[in-house]
């Protein structure tokens, strides 16, 4: 297919446009003068994102591209098939998702990027990352997939390094990220290698047509799920998330968290729905276990974090866990023959993915705005931002509502669909389901509960109350580009929550699920399980109740206006200092007590007594630290072992020529014996 | 959306607002009598409410819209609960059926509004109350969903009205293990969600133990009035739900005026009796230490879990 | 056209003579560069000529250029251009014996060219041994105890290894005596592969591969490599890593072609997978706690050779094409990396990773390309190494080397972690005073910019050739076919 | 040349090669080692001449002469010169017990005989019967490299290895083409010269030629 014929097909044209815009953005980032760089490069990336959104939507709605071939120097002999970009419906969905997030993040970046993130390298890396990410779901074969995947990984690694010169943890975070990303890549490479070997070709079509089964399928499944899980940030391979997200520039964190980890989800769906459909039952159990474990562990860690971006990072692990759970449940039900409910679970997974993309963008952008305004991301040092940053505050609040899955946001719709799929499982005839589904339900419910606490904390401590530091007190509102990005994101969060019907119908196409239809213009009717959700009607009902209340309140307020006081209720004395306020650490203290063992919490009270008497206390210091059990038990020993092996390996190269000759000699003798045998 | 179901919603709303002060009054009086006190009378809460709503609230420097909005949101969420839960009749709005997950999320909106209000003032007490409140809400969540899940399995739907109807149609299901376990778990949930003993003591102002009161400590006048009303309405709604699930008789199933009247009467009696029983029970219970509450909730979670498993494995 | 073959053999010899005569004039440094450019040009011309009219022979069949030889000549030429141009020392760093240094470099190029255009395996062996001799002085040219030690180890281990290869060739020659006159002509051996004495072929090929593996830096006979690479001047390290190792591996490929035709692929598979996995393991073990950045690069070369061995073990058009392309990509990148390492050494005066800090801020002209090159070595796209690594692993799975490829992936992760950690330790990090570091570097002057050109070209080329379906796919496929076609 | 004489000469020269090799391992004196190398070179040249004449190749005389000059004259002379230059005539230390060294040598010779059979397959001619000697020389030369600490002795070991390969070459296929043979000989000669230079530099720089002390470059 030549360039000339591209223009006749929307998908092909869109793919080409993304490539060209990405390349142009790289060029502009390099040549544009520093003053205009943010605007020009950012605008180009926004356009590329929009192009991806349009292309992806077209693909999702069934417009098939003829395929854009990537030239490659290697001969196209077996098993290598042509490298082609041609998104299917599922791919289209994820491309659109990535594109929208990229557009939001780049728009935010126009106002936000400063210092190294606004450098030539910074914007060029962002463009590479963005286009690579958008093209991952467009790949129609393994090599193109890995190519886009690694462009995404490379670009993000470079951007992660942006602040290396000012913050020491950046380097360590980058190493963690790079290594875990490469782990993911190698898993995928090996997994696709197994599939390509079994199918005799690298394209999805060949692999799918080969109906691979048996040990090869199992091996491929394990390797690929491990690879995708690493990228998605599932426990126990989540460790890069809470390190990389906080250290990356915030627009990058948003893109990574809202879109990049979704590529892992896309991969799991691609694997289980297209490449290896109809695998054994334990595959889905594995996914449910991975997902539920990640959801619970992620939200538990998130709930006790005081670092806002770290909190959001762990919350990403939670959400990805929920998505994986939903996928696992869907597959489990398919293997049990309950196709109608399975479809609901799969649509729920996609709804969760889309909704997470929307609200997590807003939350990370909001966190970026806070960081921009105060230079702090530690909740213990923030507070009172609602009065100083009204736009950020409202949009972050909407995002937090979404994350807490409260109505009427996209998060609520998604979680509602997941719960509906769970309770409509017919487990009577199936003991496995009768055990798995209630446990899953319990874990999901606990996750929802803790999620609520987490985001009440994040919002309440960070934005309400009084400023805890001068930095927080001097916060200022974000600029227009940043505000626009946050508002657009917030609109998406609410909008998707208000009209779930059409959205779910579109999503259902991606997994060819039936039984999803629109009711009352915007409402969602799950015909398969006969339930309906109409957020617009719910909103109207709420308004019908709320408006009279507000009117009554206004009338009362006119009669008895508010009285300003210095102190509402000061415990009988004056309010001494902001340090008296509850902060993020104290907020989660009861929870830490409850889950002490799984959080590896250490609490230390240090009391300094007065000289005069041991009964008088001069100063008390309370320190609370929580650790990541998995990191301590799995990764630290692994790195220790690696170090030990490294020391051991050094004896190979100890400088003695006699040892070296010995190696050659041993090899010679062995080869002689080998050929003589 | 038929006129009948709109009427039912309106009736339930009015009924809830009317019955709630009485319910609180009954509960307080019961408790006072059992403790050998005279008490303020059944209508005392009503009088308190009127007084508070007519008083001016205060505002400290740096406070935000949350100060005004949270109390009203709490009331709205509680009223929405009253509208969605089948109290007097199982007729539901077609486009907003009383889906249990929607109901739970509406309940949570109220919970969050309260928690944010607690943090808004920036005082140590508010934060403390908010923190404890949310921890309990988080830990209650699994029990809530699982117990209703258990009840919904036999009915095959998550719409509360349909569940109540199904239970009424099959009275034998009321006393089977699934039902008993689930209802018991639900009672624990209601106690925790509404801040009753032994999870929280609604009448204490002792700094170390209070949860609900700590959050609303900074509010006064009209704000406090709304907050009290919202909390009370919540209790009414949840008691009504438990009552109708445990004893589904009397609830109206069509729009005929007579059945509606019967339904109104039945729910009023059920809620008041249940409230009195609850109050009476509270006399004999001491408040649990905060860090023993998770054990209580874990126990209720196990009950709910068993009831779900039972609902699959017994059938 | 066949006379073209003589140019890369004769011209460097002439230039070597000129440099000896010119002694310490500074322009002699440009003679090896021009020789390399000519080599590259001839290589490209031969690729085209061979593509049009098939293999060329001259000198009574002793020299023969087929598509593979032409490709290798191009690889040698292009890598040598980068290493030699980039490695031209700054005016202040020049020593007195430039002339002999330049002439040795020219001789090295001549030997390398001879190795790839020789049809007779014995002649190829002679040429490869000649490179040991020329590089021995180059390795030791810095003087001092370390250089002496490295040179000794290099010559002893290298010569012994190559001697074993000679033994192997002798046995191969004996194996061919059954077909008439004993011969070491590759064409003859391949044509009569069916008539070779199996036992002798087996022994001969195994020993030849073992011997050439020493020169190619494959474990367990890799031991000379880190010492020699770390002690040699940057240019020489770059040439050795990018050219010498590849040419030695080319010899292995030639021997493998004969053996596979005579005996089937099992023997070579066992030997090459063992060597490949051991090389990856050695690298994995030694990069974790590596303290010397030139040794780090040297071990990375061992890793890449291990990958090539795995690719050759897998066999088949895809894997072999990937191996050949990887030689080019790795050579370009590694020679630039060694050149950069030499400049870093000049800047810090120390081999220690611990002494190099925050290059990206302090010396962006070194830190930036160094990071990019590392990315290329680690196989990030768009660099060609990404494609070749992926192709080798996938082809390995397809050709039945499943568990070996899984092990290789595991080892590659450790290598990745070790290299990333060490390179990031050198290039990035927090400064106590970021502004001071930023202002300390002045813009590059013209000569410095000029010295950046070869590195920019090398990295740029390695970034685009992965996509270069035209003009690379055809010659690659031709080279694979020349090696015995689709086996 | 009659078959009997051919076999006799073959046996004599190969026997001499093996004898000198074992004596190399046994001995400690550097000068004697170089002397043995001369003897080995002569034996090798004899072997080449025998095989060549038996096969009726006139060029064998040239090759034999070349080998005699290079291996029995030039190389030993160069080494002796280096040794004199640095004043080393006797090896200071052995890295292993002499008994172990000799037992190892015996074992390697046995190994050589053991592996040669299968490698040669169905060849039964007289020359092939002598191939294990060549393999022994290779292995013993390697053994010298492995156990001896002095730079010069390592050089001796390398040359022995090379002699072994040459012997195998002539015993199995009657030698390689002349140009290759010339090139190979030249290469070995150059290697020996370079190593000789390095030995001298080592003595000058370090004051000793004990290469087990060369352990500065390590990980």
Image (cartoon, rainbow, N blue to C red):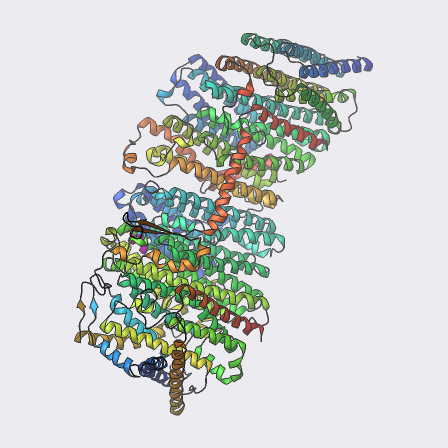
Q: Residue at x 60, y 33 (%)?
A: C253
Question: In the picture shown, does residue A37 fall above or below A553?
Answer: above
> Looking at the picture, does residue A356 appear above or below residue D116?
below
Query: In this orientation, which residue lies closer to the viewer: C407 or C250?
Result: C407
Name, please, the residue furthest toward the front: A613
The reply, left or right, for residue A152 in relation to residue A39 is: right
User: Along the line of sight, which residue is nearer the eye, A223 or A62?
Assistant: A223
* Residue B83 coordinates in the image, percent (x, y): 36, 79
Query: Taking the image as drawn, is residue C143 in sight?
Result: yes
Q: Nearer the viewer, residue A290 or B266?
A: B266
Is D186 left, or right, of C90 in this rendering?
right
Position of A50 with respect to D3 (left or right) is left
- The magenta stretch is A366-370
Looking at the rendered image, the quarter that the N terminus of chain D falls into is top right
Against B47, residue A314 (above or below) is: above
- Residue B225, quarter of picture: bottom left
Q: Position of residue C127 (x, y in %)?
A: 57, 22
A103 within the magenta span = no
Quarter of the rendering containing residue C32: top left
- Residue A524: tell me if it is visible: no
Q: For residue A368: magenta?
A: yes
Please, what is the dominant secondary structure of the magenta stretch? helix
Count of marks placed on residues: 0
The image position of residue B94, as x and y in percent, is 40, 79
């Amino acid at each position: 297919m030549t360039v000339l014929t591209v223009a006749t097909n929307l998908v092909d044209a869109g793919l080409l446009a993304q490539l060209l815009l990405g390349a142009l953005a790289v060029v502009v980032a390099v040549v544009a003068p520093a003053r205009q760089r943010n605007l020009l490069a950012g605008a180009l990336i926004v356009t590329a994102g929009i192009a991806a959104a349009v292309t992806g939507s077209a693909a999702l709605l069934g417009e098939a591209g003829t395929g854009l071939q990537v030239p490659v120097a290697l001969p196209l002999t077996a098993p290598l098939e042509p490298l082609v970009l041609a998104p299917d419906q599922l791919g289209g969905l994820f491309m659109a998702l990535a594109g929208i997030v990229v557009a939001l993040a780049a728009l935010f970046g126009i106002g936000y990027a400063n210092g190294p993130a606004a450098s030539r390298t910074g914007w060029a890396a962002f463009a590479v990352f963005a286009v690579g990410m958008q093209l991952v779901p467009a790949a129609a074969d393994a090599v193109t997939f890995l190519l886009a995947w690694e462009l995404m990984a490379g670009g993000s690694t470079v951007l992660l390094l942006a602040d290396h010169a000012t913050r020491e943890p950046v380097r360590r975070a980058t190493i963690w990220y790079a290594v875990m990303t490469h782990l993911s890549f190698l898993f995928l490479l090996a997994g696709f290698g197994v599939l390509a070997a079994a199918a005799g070709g690298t394209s999805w079509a060949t692999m799918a047509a080969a109906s691979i089964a048996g040990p090869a399928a199992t091996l491929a499944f394990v390797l690929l799920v491990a690879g995708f899980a690493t990228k998605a940030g599932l426990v126990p391979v989540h460790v890069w998330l809470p390190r990389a997200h906080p250290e990356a520039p915030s627009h990058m964190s948003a893109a990574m968290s809202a879109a990049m980890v979704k590529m892992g989800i896309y991969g799991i769906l691609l694997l289980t729905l297209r490449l290896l459909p109809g695998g054994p039952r334990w595959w889905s159990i594995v996914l449910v276990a991975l997902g539920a474990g990640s959801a619970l562990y992620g939200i538990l860690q998130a709930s006790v974090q005081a670092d806002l971006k770290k909190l959001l990072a762990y919350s990403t692990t939670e959400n990805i866990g929920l998505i994986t759970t939903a996928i696992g449940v869907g597959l489990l039900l398919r293997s049990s023959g309950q196709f109608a409910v399975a479809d609901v679970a799969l649509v729920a997974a996609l709804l969760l993915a889309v909704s997470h993309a929307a609200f997590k963008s807003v939350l990370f952008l909001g966190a970026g705005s806070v960081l921009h305004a105060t230079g702090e991301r530690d909740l213990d040092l923030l507070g009172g931002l609602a009065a100083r940053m009204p736009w950020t505050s409202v949009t972050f609040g909407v995002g937090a509502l979404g994350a807490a899955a409260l109505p009427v946001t996209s998060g609520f719709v998604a979680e509602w669909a997941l719960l509906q799929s769970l309770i409509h499982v017919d487990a009577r005839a199936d003991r496995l389901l009768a055990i798995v589904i209630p446990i899953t339900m319990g874990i999901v419910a606990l996750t929802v509960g803790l999620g609520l606490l987490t985001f009440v904390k994040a919002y309440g401590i960070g934005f309400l109350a009084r400023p805890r530091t001068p930095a927080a007190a001097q916060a200022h509102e974000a600029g227009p580009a940043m505000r626009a990005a946050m508002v657009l994101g917030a609109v998406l969060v609410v909008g998707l929550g208000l009209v779930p019907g059409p959205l779910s119908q579109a999503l259902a196409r991606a997994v060819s699920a039936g039984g999803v239809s629109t009711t009352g213009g915007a409402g969602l009717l799950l015909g398969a399980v006969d339930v309906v959700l109409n957020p617009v009607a719910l909103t109207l009902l709420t308004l019908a109740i709320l408006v009279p209340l507000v009117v009554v309140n206004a009338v009362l307020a006119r009669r008895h206006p508010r009285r300003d006081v210095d102190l509402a209720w000061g415990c009988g004395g004056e309010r001494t200092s902001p340090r008296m306020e509850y902060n993020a650490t104290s907020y989660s203290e009861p929870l830490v007590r409850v889950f002490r063992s799984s959080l590896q919490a250490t609490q230390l009270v240090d009391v300094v007594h007065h000289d005069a008497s041991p009964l008088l206390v001069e100063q008390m210091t309370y320190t609370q630290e929580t650790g990541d059990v998995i990191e301590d038990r799995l990764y630290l020993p692994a790195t220790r072992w690696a170090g030990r092996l490294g020391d051991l390996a050094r004896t190979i190269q100890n400088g003695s020529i006699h040892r070296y000759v010995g190696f050659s000699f041993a090899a010679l003798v062995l080869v002689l014996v080998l050929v003589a045998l | 959306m038929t006129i009948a179901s709109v009427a039912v919603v309106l009736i339930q709303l009015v009924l809830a607002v009317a019955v709630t002060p009485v319910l609180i009054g009954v509960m307080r009086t019961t408790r006072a009598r059992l403790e050998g006190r005279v008490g303020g009378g059944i209508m005392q809460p009503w009088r308190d409410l009127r007084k508070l709503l007519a008083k001016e609230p205060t505002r400290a420097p740096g406070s935000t819209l949350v100060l005004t909005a949270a109390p009203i949101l709490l009331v709205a969420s509680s009223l929405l609960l009253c509208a969605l839960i089948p109290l007097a009749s199982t007729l539901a709005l077609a486009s907003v059926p009383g889906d249990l997950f929607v109901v739970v999320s509406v309940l949570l909106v109220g919970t969050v509004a309260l928690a944010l209000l607690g943090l808004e003032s920036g005082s140590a007490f508010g934060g403390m109350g908010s923190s404890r409140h949310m921890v309990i809400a988080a830990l209650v969540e699994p029990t809530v969903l699982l117990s209703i899940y258990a009840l919904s399995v036999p009915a095959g739907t998550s719409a509360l009205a349909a569940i109540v109807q199904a239970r009424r149609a099959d009275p034998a299901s009321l006393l089977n293990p699934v039902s008993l376990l689930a209802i018991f778990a639900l009672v624990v949930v209601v106690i925790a969600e509404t801040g009753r003993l032994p999870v929280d003591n609604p009448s204490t102002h002792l700094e170390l133990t209070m949860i609900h009161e700590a959050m609303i400590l900074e509010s006064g006048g009209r704000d406090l009035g709304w907050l009290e009303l919202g909390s009370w309405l919540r209790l009414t709604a949840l008691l009504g739900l438990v009552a109708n699930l445990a004893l589904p008789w009397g609830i109206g199933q069509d729009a005929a005026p007579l059945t509606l009247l019967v339904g109104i009467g039945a729910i009023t009696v059920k809620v008041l009796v249940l409230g009195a029983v609850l109050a009476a029970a509270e006399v004999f219970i001491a408040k649990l230490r905060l860090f023993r509450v998770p054990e209580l909730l874990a126990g209720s979670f196990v009950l709910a879990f068993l009831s779900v498993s039972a609902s699959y494995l017994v059938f | 056209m066949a006379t073209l073959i003589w140019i890369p053999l004769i011209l460097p010899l002439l230039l070597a003579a000129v440099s000896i005569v010119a002694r310490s004039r500074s322009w002699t440094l440009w003679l090896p560069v021009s020789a390399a450019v000519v080599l590259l040009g001839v290589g490209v011309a031969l690729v085209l000529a061979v593509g049009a009219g098939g293999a060329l022979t001259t000198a009574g069949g002793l020299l023969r250029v087929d598509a593979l030889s032409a490709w290798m000549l191009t690889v040698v030429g292009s890598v040598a251009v980068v290493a030699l141009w980039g490695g031209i020392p700054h005016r202040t760093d020049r020593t007195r014996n430039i002339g002999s240094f330049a002439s040795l470099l020219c001789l090295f190029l001549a030997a390398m060219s001879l190795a790839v255009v020789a049809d007779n395996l014995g002649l190829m062996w002679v040429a490869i041994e000649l490179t040991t001799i020329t590089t021995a002085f180059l390795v030791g040219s810095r003087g001092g105890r370390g250089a002496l030690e490295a040179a000794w180890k290099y010559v002893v281990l290298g010569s012994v290894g190559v001697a074993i290869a000679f033994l192997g060739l002798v046995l191969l020659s004996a194996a061919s005596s059954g077909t008439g006159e004993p011969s070491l002509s590759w064409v003859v051996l391949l044509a009569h592969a069916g008539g070779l004495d199996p036992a002798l072929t087996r022994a001969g090929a195994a020993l030849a591969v073992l011997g050439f593996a020493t020169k190619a830096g494959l474990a367990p006979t890799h031991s000379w490599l880190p010492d020699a690479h770390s002690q040699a001047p940057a240019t020489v390290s770059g040439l050795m890593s990018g050219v010498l190792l590849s040419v030695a591996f080319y010899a292995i490929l030639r021997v493998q072609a004969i053996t596979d035709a005579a005996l089937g692929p099992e023997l070579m598979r066992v030997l090459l997978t063992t060597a490949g996995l051991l090389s990856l393991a050695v690298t994995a073990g030694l990069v974790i706690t590596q303290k010397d950045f030139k040794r780090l690069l040297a071990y990375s070369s061992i890793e890449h050779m291990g990958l090539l061995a795995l690719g050759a073990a897998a066999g088949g058009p895809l894997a072999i094409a990937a191996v050949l392309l990887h030689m080019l990509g790795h050579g370009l990148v590694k020679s630039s990396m060694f050149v950069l390492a030499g400049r870093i050494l000049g800047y810090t005066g120390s081999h220690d990773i611990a002494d190099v800090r925050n290059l990206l801020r302090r010396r962006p002209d070194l830190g930036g390309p160094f990071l990019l090159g590392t990315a290329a070595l680690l196989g990030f796209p768009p660099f060609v190494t990404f494609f070749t690594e992926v192709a080798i692993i996938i082809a390995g799975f397809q050709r039945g080397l499943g568990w070996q490829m899984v092990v290789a992936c595991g080892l590659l992760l450790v290598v990745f972690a070790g290299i990333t950690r060490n390179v990031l330790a050198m290039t990035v990090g927090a400064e106590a005073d970021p502004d001071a570091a930023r202002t300390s570097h002045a813009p590059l002057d013209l000569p410095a910019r000029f010295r950046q050109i070869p590195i920019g070209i090398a990295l740029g080329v390695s970034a685009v050739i992965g996509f270069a379906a035209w003009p690379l796919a055809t010659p690659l496929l031709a080279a694979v076919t020349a090696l015995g076609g689709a086996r | 040349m009659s078959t009997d004489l051919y076999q006799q000469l073959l046996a004599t020269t190969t026997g001499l090669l093996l004898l000198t090799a074992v004596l190399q391992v046994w001995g400690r004196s550097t000068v004697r080692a170089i002397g043995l190398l001369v003897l080995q070179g002569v034996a090798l040249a004899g072997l080449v001449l025998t095989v060549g004449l038996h096969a009726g190749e006139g060029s064998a005389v040239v090759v034999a002469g070349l080998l005699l000059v290079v291996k029995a004259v030039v190389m030993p002379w160069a080494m002796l010169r280096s040794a004199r230059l640095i004043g080393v005539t006797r090896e200071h230390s052995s890295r292993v017990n002499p008994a172990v060294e000799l037992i190892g040598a015996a074992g390697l010779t046995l190994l050589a005989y053991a592996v040669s059979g299968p490698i040669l397959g169905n060849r039964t001619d007289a020359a092939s019967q002598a191939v294990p000697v060549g393999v022994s020389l290779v292995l013993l030369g390697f053994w010298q490299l492995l156990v001896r600490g002095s730079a010069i002795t390592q050089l001796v070991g390398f040359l022995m290895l090379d002699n072994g390969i040459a012997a195998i070459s002539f015993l199995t296929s009657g030698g390689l083409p002349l140009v290759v043979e010339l090139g190979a000989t030249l290469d070995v000669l150059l290697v020996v010269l370079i190593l000789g230079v390095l030995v001298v530099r080592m003595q000058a720089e370090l004051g000793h030629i004990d290469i087990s002390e060369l352990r500065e470059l390590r990980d």
